[in-house]
Image (cartoon, rainbow, N blue to C red):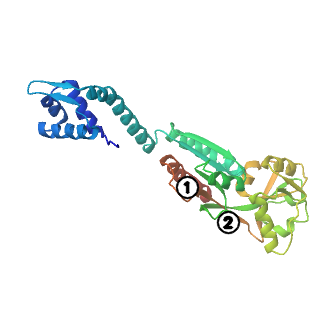
């Protein structure tokens, strides 16, 4: 048998159980005595047992009433803790946000985002997984992160992709390299005579480069393939080749030894956006982080 007990029901029962007076309990609950009697009657009907023995002179708990009284306070406390916990989540006083991000974004975008978010919502726990594009989509699909910040991937049609910003590719060359002798624009075709140091084939960066080359009638065949931006930076600095990278990735490794040149002919733009599951909604904490992320990326784009 299903019994629906409200917070008000339990408080009314306890008011009678503690005072053993319907008149006092009615005043405490701001009810008429007849309304309180009706409420207790509904409880007794729901439990299928009398909770109080009543005479014109006295009120006493029955055995069933004693059992309910022994648990009612705990039930009320549980309800209050549950309500408080839900309110804490809604008010961003409790919760967790987990996200995945491309390594370049994890190094460039996420640290200031986490710092600002942590200052505003210090009780929200944050988690970051820095990974490549395809694993980031899988983490969202598996529900291991709230959302991912990554490049678009049309293969994941079951997930929602919300574009947030774009970044354009630039060429990185050492200052002593022939292509690093000046800092002006350079066409992609004019860079292909030099050895290229590229991200590996399963990365979004490499896919954008190969697509741009193919659309303009030439192939892209890098001399070196690596998985980490720091490795590319070190190899470019040693004049082992040049690298074409999105500007946000270039921000991570640019230094005094490296010249950065805008790539044109074609201009290659990478879409950066948020990936999330279609079903369900983001938690209040994740929604707050998304709002802060949008503001931050708008500031990056404006700069």
- Residue 114 x, y percent position in the rendering: 59, 43
Give the CA separation, mark 1 to mark 2. 22 Å
- Image quarter (top left, top right, bottom left or bottom right) of the C terminus: bottom right
Query: At 62% across and 59% down in the image, what residue appears?
Result: 273
- For mark 2, what is the residue? 154
Location of residue 16 (image quadrant): top left
Q: Earlier in the sequence, mark 1 or mark 2?
A: 2
Which numbered disc covers residue 268?
none
Q: Name the foreground residue: 160 vs 141.
A: 141
Q: Horizontally, is 186 left or right of 275 in the view?
A: right
Query: Which secondary structure, mark 1?
Result: helix
- For mark 1, what is the residue? 294
Q: Horizontally, is 118 left or right of 234 in the view?
A: left
Q: Horizontally, is 253 left or right of 128 in the view?
A: right
Mark 2 neighbour density, 10 Å: few (under 14) some (14–19) many (20 or more):
few
Location of residue 90 (image quadrant): top left
């Amino acid at each position: 048998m299903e019994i629906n007990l409200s917070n008000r029901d339990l408080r009314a029962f306890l008011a009678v159980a503690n005072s053993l007076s319907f008149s006092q309990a009615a005043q405490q609950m701001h009810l008429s005595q007849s309304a309180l009697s009706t409420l207790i009657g509904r409880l007794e009907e729901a439990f299928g047992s009398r909770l109080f023995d009543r005479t014109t002179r006295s009120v006493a708990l029955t055995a069933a009433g004693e059992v309910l009284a022994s648990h009612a306070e705990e039930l009320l406390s549980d309800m209050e803790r549950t309500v408080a916990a839900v309110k804490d989540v809604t008010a961003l006083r409790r919760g967790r946000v987990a996200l995945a991000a491309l390594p370049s974004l994890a190094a460039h975008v996420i640290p200031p985002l986490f710092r600002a978010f942590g200052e505003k919502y210090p009780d929200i726990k944050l988690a970051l997984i820095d990974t490549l594009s395809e694993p980031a989509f899988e983490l969202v699909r598996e529900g291991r992160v709230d959302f991912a910040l990554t490049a678009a991937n049309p293969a994941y049609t079951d997930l929602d992709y919300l574009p947030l910003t774009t970044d354009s590719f630039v060429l990185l060359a050492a200052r002593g390299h022939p292509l690093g002798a000046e800092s002006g624009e350079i066409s992609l075709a004019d860079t292909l005579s030099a050895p290229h140091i590229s991200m590996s084939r399963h990365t979004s960066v490499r896919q954008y480069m190969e697509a741009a080359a193919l659309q303009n009638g030439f192939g892209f065949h890098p001399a070196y393939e690596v998985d980490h931006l720091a490795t590319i930076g070190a190899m470019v600095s040693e004049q082992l080749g040049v690298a074409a990278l999105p500007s946000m990735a270039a921000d991570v490794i640019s230094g005094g030894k490296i010249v950065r040149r805008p790539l044109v002919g074609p201009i290659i733009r990478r879409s950066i956006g948020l990936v999330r599951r279609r079903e369900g909604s983001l938690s209040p904490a994740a929604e707050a982080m998304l709002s802060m992320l949008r503001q931050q990326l708008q500031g990056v784009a404006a700069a």
